[in-house]
């Protein structure tokens, strides 16, 4: 699991609610879970409000994902050829970047994931880099909120749809009326400030986040079916 720009932990040191909910869910389904903390060891807790982010989701964080994969493959208590990568927001961007055919060796050496799932990633930068010809080496499932004004839906829809059209095992599922973090168990819909120096116009933006029960439950159903299906291949 790869967390978003809010980080893995709260100020009090507890794992954030949504990450905790997914950990419990995956374990209940019979999966071993490794959550990679990309922030705390580097001396920061969150990056959502930082204009200049010291850790790049596309260029840096995939190394953390493959570091986790390399460690898991050495463990005797799991099937080391049945390891999936799941990321949220900033971590979802790392997931998409790390799954690129032309970058997998660079980020992971000889290690590869069985498949990956990405929740509401931002795809503008990656879409430009790959010239809308995204090529994942493994099956990919992307969840998108159509009302998301933090990580816009259309760039991801266009990129994943083109990948599927090109014959790659990629698909997206989009939910109407769903904002960023729609899968959170109990996050009231609210606005918050996000900063990013890479944004062309406003370096500071008010964005909407919040739970969407129907979208969350549908995503839970879809991901379980998808993971179980991929794991049997």
Image (tube, grey):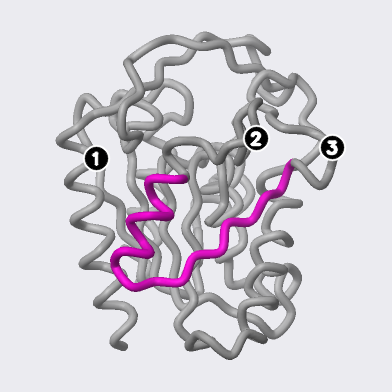
Lower position in the chain sequence, tag 1 or tag 2: 2
Lower position in the chain sequence, tag 1 or tag 3: 3
Query: Residue 32 or 64: which is nearer the viewer?
Result: 32
| Secondary structure state at the residue bearing disc 2 | loop
Question: Which-is-in-front pick, marks 1 and 3?
Answer: 3
Q: Which residues are magenta?
A: 20-39
Kindly identify which residue carries mark 3.
Answer: 43
Question: Which-is-in-front pick, marks 1 and 2?
Answer: 2
User: Which quadrant of the view contains residue 39?
Assistant: top right
Label 3: few (<14), some (14–19) or many (≥20) C-alpha neighbours in 10 Å: few
Q: Are marks 1 and 3 in contact (CB under 8 Å)?
A: no
Question: Which-is-in-front pick, marks 3 and 2?
Answer: 2
Residue 200 x, y percent position in the rendering: 66, 18
| Secondary structure state at the residue bearing disc 1 | helix
Kindly identify which residue carries mark 1.
Answer: 216
Distance Cα–Cα, label 1 vs label 2: 25 Å
Distance Cα–Cα, label 1 vs label 3: 32 Å
Query: Residue 10 or 173: which is nearer the viewer?
Result: 10
């Amino acid at each position: 699991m790869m967390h978003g720009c809010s980080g893995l932990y709260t100020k009090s040191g507890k794992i954030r609610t949504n990450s905790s909910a997914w950990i419990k869910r995956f374990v209940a389904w019979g999966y071993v879970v490794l959550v990679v903390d990309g922030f705390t060891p580097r001396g920061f807790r969150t990056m959502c409000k930082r204009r200049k982010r010291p850790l790049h989701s596309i260029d840096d964080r995939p190394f953390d994902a493959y570091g986790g994969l390399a460690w898991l493959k050495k463990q005797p208590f799991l099937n080391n050829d049945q390891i999936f990568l799941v990321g949220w927001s900033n971590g979802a961007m790392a997931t998409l970047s790390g799954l690129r055919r032309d970058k997998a060796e660079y980020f992971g050496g000889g290690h590869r994931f069985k498949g990956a799932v990405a929740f509401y990633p931002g795809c503008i930068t990656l879409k430009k880099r790959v010239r809308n010809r995204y090529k994942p080496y493994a099956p990919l499932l992307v969840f998108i909120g159509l009302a998301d004004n933090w990580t816009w839906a259309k760039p991801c829809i266009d990129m994943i749809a083109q990948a599927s059209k090109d014959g790659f095992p990629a698909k997206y599922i989009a939910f109407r009326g769903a904002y960023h973090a729609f899968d959170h168990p109990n996050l009231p819909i609210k606005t918050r400030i996000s900063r990013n120096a890479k944004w062309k116009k406003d370096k500071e933006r008010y964005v909407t986040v919040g739970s969407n029960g129907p979208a969350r439950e549908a995503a839970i159903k879809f991901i379980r079916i998808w993971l179980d299906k991929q794991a049997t291949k």
